[in-house]
Image (tube, coloured by chain):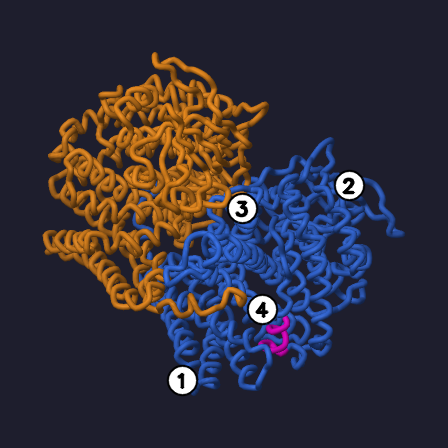
Chain colours: A blue, B orange
Amino acid sequence: MPTYIAPTKDMQFLLHEVLKASESSVPGYDELEPDFTGAVLEEAGKLASEVLQPLNVVGDTEGCTFENGVVRTPEGFKAAFDQLREGGWTALDCDPEYGGQGMPYLLGTAVGEMFVSANMAFNMYQGLTHGAYSAIHAHGSDEQKATYLPKMVTCEWTGTMNLTEPHCGTDLGLMRTKAVPQDDGTYKVSGQKIFISAGDHDMAENIIHLVLAKIPGGPDGIKGVSLFIVPKFLVNEDGSLGARNGVSVGKIEEKMGIHGNATCVMNYDEATGYLIGEAHKGMRAMFTMMNEARLGVGLQGYAQSEVAYQNALAYAVDRLQGRDVTGAKNPDGPADPLIVHPDIRRNLMDQKSFTEGARAFTFWGASLIDAAHRSGDKDADGLISLLTPVIKGFQTDKGFEMATNAQQVYGGHGYIEEWGMSQFARDARIAMIYEGANGVQALDLVGRKLAQDGGKHVMGFFEMVKTFCKENAGDAAFDAEFLNPLKAASKDLQAAGMYFMQNGTKNPNHALAGSYDFMHMFGHVCLGYMWARMGLAAKQALAAGASDTEFYETKLTTGRYYMARQLPATAMHLARIQSGADTVMALKAANF
Amino acid sequence: MPTYIAPTKDMQFLLHEVLKASESSVPGYDELEPDFTGAVLEEAGKLASEVLQPLNVVGDTEGCTFENGVVRTPEGFKAAFDQLREGGWTALDCDPEYGGQGMPYLLGTAVGEMFVSANMAFNMYQGLTHGAYSAIHAHGSDEQKATYLPKMVTCEWTGTMNLTEPHCGTDLGLMRTKAVPQDDGTYKVSGQKIFISAGDHDMAENIIHLVLAKIPGGPDGIKGVSLFIVPKFLVNEDGSLGARNGVSVGKIEEKMGIHGNATCVMNYDEATGYLIGEAHKGMRAMFTMMNEARLGVGLQGYAQSEVAYQNALAYAVDRLQGRDVTGAKNPDGPADPLIVHPDIRRNLMDQKSFTEGARAFTFWGASLIDAAHRSGDKDADGLISLLTPVIKGFQTDKGFEMATNAQQVYGGHGYIEEWGMSQFARDARIAMIYEGANGVQALDLVGRKLAQDGGKHVMGFFEMVKTFCKENAGDAAFDAEFLNPLKAASKDLQAAGMYFMQNGTKNPNHALAGSYDFMHMFGHVCLGYMWARMGLAAKQALAAGASDTEFYETKLTTGRYYMARQLPATAMHLARIQSGADTVMALKAANF
């Protein structure tokens, strides 16, 4: 059976030695003192390891059931959800006005990683509620906020996001779900939504569906889409639950993974809905919380890679097979442990260096979101808007790849469900698809984000990397091992951007055909930048005489590995990009 | 529901225009005239599409069951297996002396690809029988051959391979299964074997298990391993079935995929076994058929990629979503089909160019096996021995990656089991593990095959590529698009080999830490070489005035894509390799 131990030490290193959170001027960050965050992470880690993780395999094996119109979650989920609520974990980074604890999103992200590593399917019930909470919080009326948010902060009521329909996923302009205005100011919502995660279940009194729909007579396409609150049970004026609304589950889907989460077909049949914000501005309401939602999915990528890595490592240390070619390491045993073999180490180091780099990138991203929301920092807002598709697309691709690599360490046992490694890969797979498939992330990055505000944010990013390299140059070893590879990778990325500018204006396909490679390049440069920052922090700690030298030496070694073994990918992506769109676009559809 | 159409035209192109099979002097190749192979492939394709493919989802959904000691295959498998037998398909490339049709392995490979694309789990029952047939054919006594082979050629009796035990997979020297000699010349075999594909089922009268075991008192480790025939039912002198042997199924495994194949724990309890070949030479007997078995698994990699690609393409043409940025292609419809989008094309072209390249590489490999077996061609034997780990390791990694990419084209529907795309990825995943996990393939390649016969075969490979480039140079476009990229990639591969020679002698870890990258590099060079050969054949056909210009132009475009977009990977792999073993080996196990 797989296990999970929360990487609290690594998280503390990021919060306090790399990001130096408590020194930040962002409101609320002064509370993030090491002792405080340490205590929070310790408690969250315990819940993750002892309560959520043991239910992960249960969730996968049992799955959710749908009988007589009722969705049931796997055995043990309800009790665990109660513990999550009672511990106040669902309220951690919510607004105190509605019962939240007002902690920075950064801390919520660290805690969220643990819960996702421990049980991704389970944590989605809370995660989607948080997303719906954010949308209402940002765009709802005061009355709507007062009605729904307190119960959603505690997860007594959970939330969902209803976008996709059978014939439209990415292209939401094709939407058919209708919302007909009523005399009392409400709407009657009718239509079918699919792929609704946590669409129904038995762990909450009420479920608050956020539904995109078209008001008849509005503009065509995506500009005619509005956002509605459609509760499962209507809420009376006194806050008690009223009549059952006209929303029901059509079926739950059989999926490749995340079996513990009910993915529902939702049928709306003249359900009472309440408009959020302005009519026809539904997409704008969705977009404001998209950075956060996509960062959350990017987190799922490396959180699965983290837990898969932990279990691959345990197996590699335990399983005796073959001998170290340079001499037996376990001469009294029948064979040496797998971890003596260079290719097993290559695989583990790939996982470790990606996962720690991605964690740093995600935490940094969360701190940018805090700076944007709490300090109104426009540059931070622009930068995280640029980096969001990279966090989502790159990290979920790599997270799945690394979970697959972790599975590979187990040999044949990795393919047997009983060992739990298959589940990590199967669960991680969805993160590449939902919240905008990764190809759409690449399109968003190259087609929209690069040029945003006149290209200011991408130029700012390059400038930031350059400044970092300049300010920290001079140590020959650090220059050679960290800064020079980072500079080379960043230069490749700039060259790709230049190629897009020079050729994409003539024909946008020259940019779009390279978008996926660009997203991956960008990811490598970001992880390289984070590893340089982590390497610097480790170097400084060692120079200052830190006692835990092995921890910091390990950080430096892992960083060197990423620089030497992963950053060379940028040159390959650049070569692909510079080959242009011709070979990509040449074939007629009939000749594929 | 997914579909499958056998790529007979592409196969005919390879057999007759690229490999020019019927012009070969290898015995039996003269029969491979286009009309004949066309007819065979047409019939096999029909069986694959109409009988085997519709059972693929059934096999995945139902799986095998084990109740009261009896294993049952999914509904419809038995009838399909009868059709396979009755059509003579199991006998295609078997020895006519035992009822086979004596066709070259090359033709068997083409037919095998179709069956694997249509239903991988189903085809394993036959595939494992063929493996056991080959072992007995190569190493069994005349009596053993006469007793078992005729029934195995027809698949009235199926076969299995029993190597792995709970505590030993790759390191078979740790084996505990014992074979105690009896006075009558037989052995009593006792022990437990795991991961036995097709270990038991209800589709054959008898199952012939080939079992590796140790004869007490023999040499320690891998040198003390012998190979035994252990039939499920003992065979009487007249060929009729006798008593049930002491072999039973302990359980069947719940796996990530290939649910239609029963993966069994086999318990041997003083089962009667018959030694094949010499005592303590069991591994040698296994090795002689390993090239063929591993090529068969490498084939599974691209065969899954092929069927996944076909279905991704169908969806990309059918699904309307978004608009071509350069102008609507389906202006009268609500949106354009997915295939107009550059990143969808990038994804499809990755799949297409890999799959066709891998098919060419595999067919070429099969022709080398024929040359080795039928003509005693030592160079062909050495070359295929070198290339086998590349075919197995590279093609199964990429095959899984491409099946995953095909799944991605479906967006959310790709994650729903009903659509069938998840199964292709889950089934393809096993090919990276069994028949020697891919890390072991890389070790075999770099640790053993490179230096085999004084490095003669790898030098021969480089010479062959060089000669091909020299002989076909002079057409400026072909040089630039095909030959120059191939030469550059081949040069990278040579540089990596040189790095291993210069550094691996000091410390073998410098070679082994780069083994996985080397295997992938080698794969790209081989596919580049095959694309150059296919490109040349297409160019020549066009120059000769072939009527089907679109077919040949498509080949050239697809080849150009592979050269421009995939071959740049070799430089990345080289950079990783040249970073050496230090960052890979630096960490103490406790610091991972």
Label drawn at residue A476? 1
- Can I make out residue B478 in this image? no
Where is B515 relative to B390, above or below?
below
Of labels 2 and 3, earlier in sequence is 2
Callouts 2 and 3 close, C-beta under 8 Å: no
For label 1, the SS is helix
Residue on which disc 2 sits: A245
Residue on which disc 4 sits: A365
* Subunit that carries the residue with mark 2: A
* Subunit that carries the residue with mark 1: A
Q: Amino acid at mark 3?
A: Ser
Q: CA distance from mark 3 to mark 1?
A: 44 Å
Of labels 2 and 1, earlier in sequence is 2
Q: Amino acid at mark 4?
A: Gly
For label 2, the SS is loop
Residue on which disc 3 sits: A422
Boundaries of the magenta span: A12-20
Q: Amino acid at mark 1?
A: Ala
Q: Are marks 2 and 3 on the same chain?
A: yes
Q: Position of residue B328 (x, y in %)?
A: 42, 48
